[in-house]
Amino acid sequence: MRETEQKAAQAYTKQFGSEPDLVASAPGRINLIGEHTDYNGGFVLPCAIDRRIAIAVGTGEGGLYSADFDETREVGEKDGSWADYPRSVAWAMAKDGNRVEPFEAAFAGDVPLGSGLSSSAAIEAATALALDALFGLDIERKDLAVLCQRAENDYVGVASGIMDQYASLLCEAGAALLVDCRSLEAHSVPLDLAAAGLALVVCDTRVERGLADTGYNDRRATCERAAQTLGIDELRDATDEDLNRLSGEELERARHVVSENARVLAAVEALKNNDFDEFGRLMYVSHASLRDHYEVSTPELDTFVETAREHGAKGARLTGAGFGGCAIALVPESRTDEVTEACRRAFAEHDLQEPAFYEFVPAAGAELAE
Ligand code: ADP
Ligand code: MG
């Protein structure tokens, strides 16, 4: 058992006085490339990270216990707390006509929360896999992911796309996951960073994503208008020539979406060929497009990307919606300390808040613990 899984199992026994029936865990994720493409019916390429949330579960009525918050909540009603995430999953399962019996559960995790690494999808996916096994529902992984998305959208009330739940439930160790956000088809793509001598460095700017909601909604609305102007359902279907028929903001936003979708597919080819130079180049171009055409970058994100580039990163870009949050870089293993130290200095010189750094390896998706 992994450490977080052991922690959840021990917390269960301490709280509820018996052994759990089963333990499961699910990871957070980062998106390697394909930003603001999901709601345009396009492509994304996330990978799971080696930080997880674990759930120990059994039948019973002891409630929901979080080891990280050290508090117990009743399974019952929505209350705006962390417990809404597991509740939402049980709610969505029951809504689909599945038999969900009373259960009690303990949670423990190490996904940084609220940083854009999708701790929310991790807790949903872990809960979904655990309840599916506990009640013998036999729901397919893809359907569990869709169910978790519905749980977050309709019960918790957060309008997220499908990427996070897909990544948490379907990723494989040592691989990225190409997701077609329209057909919901997904394929593993090899991502052997260790063999290439590369590390995945994440910079959490820890900047409150203040403009995130309005900025996000505004970008979404502009994309919908651009699709209308072109007479298509989604920008996924727009071509380079179509861009000539757009102007102003619609043109700028569509330019990013059309080129970003192409970059995701090119990035997948690069990975298949083990061509990390090309993969890295595409990351830099993606960042420039998000900065100049989609206009969702910040001084912190730009500083990280430029500093990483100066210190030998093969590629770097903001990841997630932007307006703060995280950026990633592909860095030769021997130079990760150099990159993070140079970034700390650059942030201090520019009077930016000190960021947090993580190094992740592409990890396995949700699993039942042995
Ligand atoms: P992100 O998904 O980017 O981490 P969100 O705001 O979507 O940020 O989700 C964070 C929320 O998920 C937390 O506020 C909490 O309610 C829940 N959560 C995250 N990690 C845990 C944990 N270890 N135990 C219980 N709840 C958690
Ligand atoms: Mg989230």
Image (cartoon, rainbow, N blue to C red):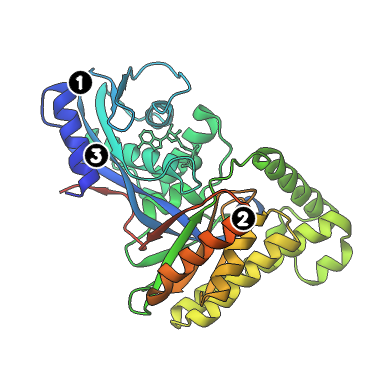
Residue under numbered circle 1: 60
Q: Amino acid at mark 1?
A: Gly
Please name which of the two marks, 1 or 3, marks the residue nearer to the observer.
1
CA gap, disc 3 and disc 2: 43 Å
Q: Are marks 2 and 1 in contact (CB under 8 Å)?
A: no
CA gap, disc 1 and disc 3: 15 Å
Q: Amino acid at mark 3?
A: Ala
The image position of residue 183, as x and y in percent, is 55, 56
Packing grade of label 1 (10 A; few <14, some 14-19, many >=20) is: few
Q: Secondary structure at mark 2?
A: helix
Give above or below for 239 relative to 323.
Answer: below
Q: Amino acid at mark 2?
A: Glu
The image position of residue 268, as x and y in percent, is 50, 73
Foreground of the two, 37 or 16: 16
Q: Secondary structure at mark 1?
A: loop
Q: Secondary structure at mark 3?
A: helix
Give above or below for 187 relative to 148.
Answer: below
CA gap, disc 2 and disc 1: 48 Å
Foreground of the two, 278 or 21: 278
